[in-house]
Image: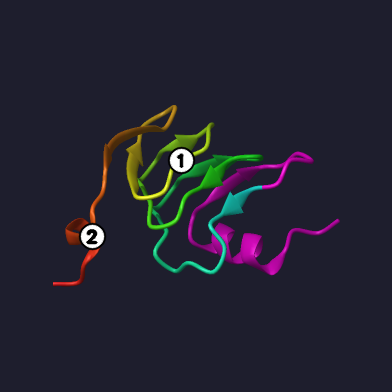
Amino acid sequence: AHPSPSVNAAKSVGLRFLYSQAPLVVHPNEDDVWIDARVTLLAGVTIGKRSVIGAGSVVTKDIPAMSLAVDDPCKVIRLLDDEDLSSK
């Protein structure tokens, strides 16, 4: 099977995927998830709504909603609040 158009679009901005039968879930219908450049997302992980994944991170486990997560392996460094995510 060919990758979905969203996977192709993600590749064009530097995301890397390791393919397997497990699904990759970025919280559906949310445009507040921010995945920075050169992030590797392992299959089967879920990125919670309104989360931010820092550049160069390798996401090996689920990331809860409203989290700032970075590193290799990716870990939550703090929870975000509405003030962090508001457009000022």
Q: What range of the chain is rendered magenta?
A: 1-23
Q: CA distance from mark 1 to mark 2?
A: 17 Å
Residue at image location 23% in from the left, 53% down from the top: 81
Relative side of 38 to 66, left or right: right
Relative side of 7 to 61, left or right: right
Number of residue marks: 2
Residue at image location 52% in from the left, 37% down from the top: 62
Residue at image location 44% in from the left, 42% down from the top: 64
**View extreme (left): residue:** 88
Relative side of 28 to 18, left or right: left
Residue at image location 48% in from the left, 61% down from the top: 13
Q: Residues within 10 Å of mark 1 (few under 14, many from 20)?
A: many
Mark 1 vs mark 2, foreground winner is: 2
Q: Secondary structure at mark 2?
A: helix
**View extreme (right): residue:** 1
In this rendering, the answer to whether 75 lies above or below 17 is: above
Q: Which mark is residue 82?
A: 2
Q: Residues within 10 Å of mark 2 (few under 14, many from 20)?
A: few
Looking at the image, is mark 1 or mark 2 earlier in the sequence?
A: 1
Task: Give the color scheme: rainbow, by chain, secondary structure or one colour.
Answer: rainbow
Instruction: Tell me the quarter of the image containing the C terminus.
Output: bottom left
- x then y, percent, for residue 56: 39, 41
The residue tagged 1 is 63
Q: Which mark is residue 53?
A: none
Instruction: Tell me the quarter of the image containing the N terminus.
Output: bottom right
**Cβ atoms at labels 1 and 2 below 8 Å apart:** no
Residue type pointed to by label 1: Ile
Q: Secondary structure at mark 1?
A: loop
Residue 50 lies in the magenta-colored region: no
- x then y, percent, for residue 19: 72, 42
Residue type pointed to by label 2: Asp
- x then y, percent, for residue 2: 81, 59
